[in-house]
Image (cartoon, rainbow, N blue to C red):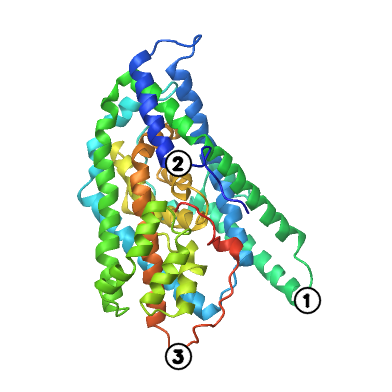
Amino acid sequence: MTTSKSFCPSMPLYTQVLIAVIFGGLLGMIFGQEPYLGGVTNAQLGKLGMVVVQLLKTLAIPLIFFAILDALIRTSLPLSQGTRLLVICLVNVSVAMTIGLVIMNTWQPGLSWQGHVDQLLQLLPGSKAPAKVATSQTPIEDLAAYIPRTILAPFSTNNIIGVVLLALVIGALLRKLHTRSARKGEDDLAIVRLVEWVYEWLVRILGWIIHAVPFAVFGVVAQVVGKSGLAVFSILWIFLVAMLAGLTIHALIYYPLVAWFVGKKSPKVYLGEGADAIMTAMSCNSSLATVPVTLHCLNRMNVSAQSSRLAACVGTNLNNDGITLYEAMAALFLAQALGYDLSLMSQFLIVAASIIAGAGVAGIPEAGMIVLPLVLSAAGLPDTVIAAAIPLIMTVDWIIARARSGVNVLSDMLVAILLDAGRTRPVAASSPVRYQAEAAHPSESQPS
């Protein structure tokens, strides 16, 4: 499967977005709401930008569905090792979510945006301030709302948890059929080949849409600045600080302490020997492209090759604490900005959606950006709010994305250390660990 490339191969996506912000801002300041170039207005450019955001949201649901099917069918992992890997990843991401919830409920940084989102919505044609989210439902009713009523319902309602539940059931069935045919020496089932083909094409289509992201940012920024001026960007710093605070606490406090006290690797070893992988991930904005460097760093830490490959290759779809923490915090931030009084149960459902979405799209280019609209929907945010907020958030997302990639690599290394520390008997370094490249794509340079 080919990777998605930028419309300008020599220029990273974040650079394109920054250029789009600059020129969009200049266009908005110069022409405001007046027509130019034969009647074109900044408002029309903004509408075109919203189309790209909607396309990303529309594509995310089928991407997650087929990504889970493909991973379930083709990933081979022994039950005992898989169980330990899953438990470690669940503990790590649970701690990440706890950190995020504590920050968002004690500091409540989203309150600084109250009033600004309503102002932003007034700049977008056809938008209106959303109604408050109802919080009268019981926890059981909240959970029941995510159970699909029909097979197609989760796709039409963007019910991400329902889509994942459906994918898990169908994927388990297809995996059983695929295993049975493999034992008989038969070729892959036609439906298995179809899943692989559809998933490959969805990723290609995603790559084409990503090409248009800088143009979408350009149009929306031109429209917003044309109506309200540059003051709308003055509130972004609090969002950036809040996101980086959560990622930093998880990566530089929790990870080193667990590696030290449980994995018997001191912070000097864990962070010092792993510095090459961390900096590589942050510079290229990809934990998957960093896999070779990660394996080399783990070897210098004297972690077995088997544990290293399990964590960095097979488990890469699960070690996405950076993405899941960011998605949940961003959703809660915007909910606070709109004055939503979310119950603790509603917050846990947002966290669950973030975890599932992060695991579902792991290995897909620009995974964090693709998942964010869905998680915002799970928080109950209207499409108008999502369409207005995404382009603004993207102006600082290039910074947060590098922090996310660094956190994901730190997660890969910690999981490998913990797997190795829990081994009950020696395993030869050359022991083969079977995994499918289709599930992990370690050779592809894809942002995480």
Element type where label 2 sits in the image? helix
Regarding residue 20, the answer to whether it shows in the image is yes
Three-letter residue code for mark 3? Arg
Q: Residue furthest bottom?
A: 425
Say whether residue 180 is left or right of residue 68.
Answer: right
- Which residue does the image show at 31% across and 25% down from the upper left? 119
Whether residue 160 is situated above or below residue 82 in the rendered picture: above
Say whether residue 48 is left or right of residue 300.
Answer: right
Residue 75 lies in quadrant: bottom right
Q: Nearer the viewer, mark 1 or mark 2?
A: 2
Residue topped by disc 2: 13
Element type where label 3 sits in the image? loop
Q: Position of residue 232 (x, y in %)?
A: 29, 28
Q: Position of residue 285 (x, y in %)?
A: 41, 52
- Between the residue at mark 3 and the residue at mark 2, the CA separation in whole angstroms equals 46 Å
- Between the residue at mark 1 and the residue at mark 2, the CA separation in whole angstroms equals 46 Å
Residue topped by disc 1: 184
Earlier-in-chain disc, 3 versus 2: 2
Q: Position of residue 3 (x, y in %)?
A: 57, 50
Q: Nearer the viewer, mark 3 or mark 2?
A: 2
Element type where label 1 sits in the image? loop
Three-letter residue code for mark 1? Lys
Regarding residue 148, the answer to whether it shows in the image is no
**Are there few (<14), some (14-19), or many (20+) residues within 10 Å of tag 2?**
many
- Which residue does the image show at 24% across and 64% down from the upper left? 253
**Are there few (<14), some (14-19), or many (20+) residues within 10 Å of tag 1?**
few
Name the foreground residue: 67 vs 114: 67
Residue topped by disc 3: 425
